[in-house]
Amino acid sequence: MLAAGAVTGVAAGLFGIGGGFIVVPALLAIFSLLGVDPELSVHMALGTSLATIILTSLRSVNAHAKRGAVDFHVLKAWAPWIVLGVLLGLVFASHTDGHTLVLIFGLGVLILSLNFLFPRAFSRIQLSESMPRGLALAGLATFLGGISALLGIGGGTIAVLTMTFCGRSIHQAVATAAGFGAIIAVPGTIGFVLIGLGAESPLPGSLGYINLIGLAAIASTSMLTAPLGAALAHRLPPMALKRAFGGYLVFTAMLMLKDAFPAQPTGIAAEEPAHAVAVPMPSAPRSDASLSLPASSRRTSP
């Protein structure tokens, strides 16, 4: 968890993401090793991931704000609609089983990895010279909040794409996207606490679907390394780093989709004919003589 937090902090500052792409798979692996029920572990991984994003995003956006790169007007305009989307995503998550959530996570990560694998192609796209307004803003921001709550992420990838498509520089997009993480994570964390209050977790230190030990471990290192990622974002050309991170996302998505589509047994032994009828076999006759022997004279198999 400490290692996952350290990597998350660098990625958050470097790419403007909340780090859920790293935290969720790490927590799923750790919870599996601890024997947590898969149905419970998915919800706990998503909830705990959102909780860690609060601190990571605030640390990251503070580091970017010192460089004057954060557009707080965009954050204020998008915030109400993002919160609405998060609430809708929480309602969906509370009525969805863990298998479906893993499938959604795998597909979502696979789609969003394209931005990191082909950064030059996406950097050339410009759909508008200004940020969305009116219904376009409301719809996009609501979608951003909803899908982020379902994936346990801070929505930074979608926010960066939107801002760069609308003519903003990559540095300003990354800096501002870091602020979206906190807007998404605060209501998301509260929601996963509330919908998980009735769940019995085998893990110590759990509050609803939030594991406080995991939160403390991941947040402690991510907050230390987030400023490092922010500094690198203003110094290094991010193309090679984006491709490397995109490769990681594809690998993670494949693992998630593998869990979502478990291999089915094949072969004759695994198949049972539809017309087969179970026929009761007569039991072997018991010897009354053996029943009449005293216990001390009976022989037992070695």
Image (cartoon, helix red, strand yellow):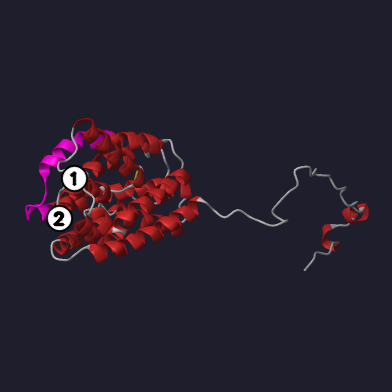
Looking at the image, the residue that sits furthest to the bottom is: 302
Residue 217 in view of the camera: no
Q: Earlier in the sequence, mark 1 or mark 2?
A: 1
Residues packed near mark 2 inside 10 Å, few (<14), some (14 to 19) or many (20 plus): many
Q: Nearer the viewer, residue 142 or 296?
A: 142
Q: Which mark is residue 171?
A: 2
- Depth check: give the residue in front, 130 or 45: 130
Q: Secondary structure at mark 1?
A: loop
219 in the magenta segment: no
Give coordinates of residue 205: x percent, y percent.
33, 50
Relative to 43, is 218 above or below?
below
Examine the residues drawn in magenta and state their main secondary structure: helix
Pinpoint residue 283: horizontal percent, then vertical percent. 86, 49
- Of the residues shown, which amino acid type is indicated by label 1? Cys
Labels 1, 2: front one: 1
Taking the spot 34% from the left edge, 55% from the top edge, the residue there is: 113
Give the residue number, with chain letter if any, for mark 1: 166
Residue lying at 30% horizontally and 48% vertically, measured from the top left: 153
State the extent of the magenta-drawn residues as a range.
62-84
Identify which residue, 301 or 293, lies in the foreground.
301
**Residue 25 shown left or right of residue 286 in the figure:** left
The N terminus lies in quadrant: bottom left
Residue 261 percent across, percent down from the top left: 52, 51
From the viewer's side, name the closer residue of 260 and 124: 124
Q: Is residue 196 left or right of residue 131?
A: right
- Compared to residue 212, the image places residue 82 above or below, namely above
Q: Secondary structure at mark 2?
A: helix
How dense is the environment of label 1, judged by Cα within 10 Å: few (below 14), some, or many (20 and up)? some
**Residue 78 falls in image quadrant:** top left
Cα separation between marks 1 and 2: 14 Å
User: Where residue 37 sits: x, y (%)?
Assistant: 48, 50
Query: Mark 2 is on which residue type?
Result: His
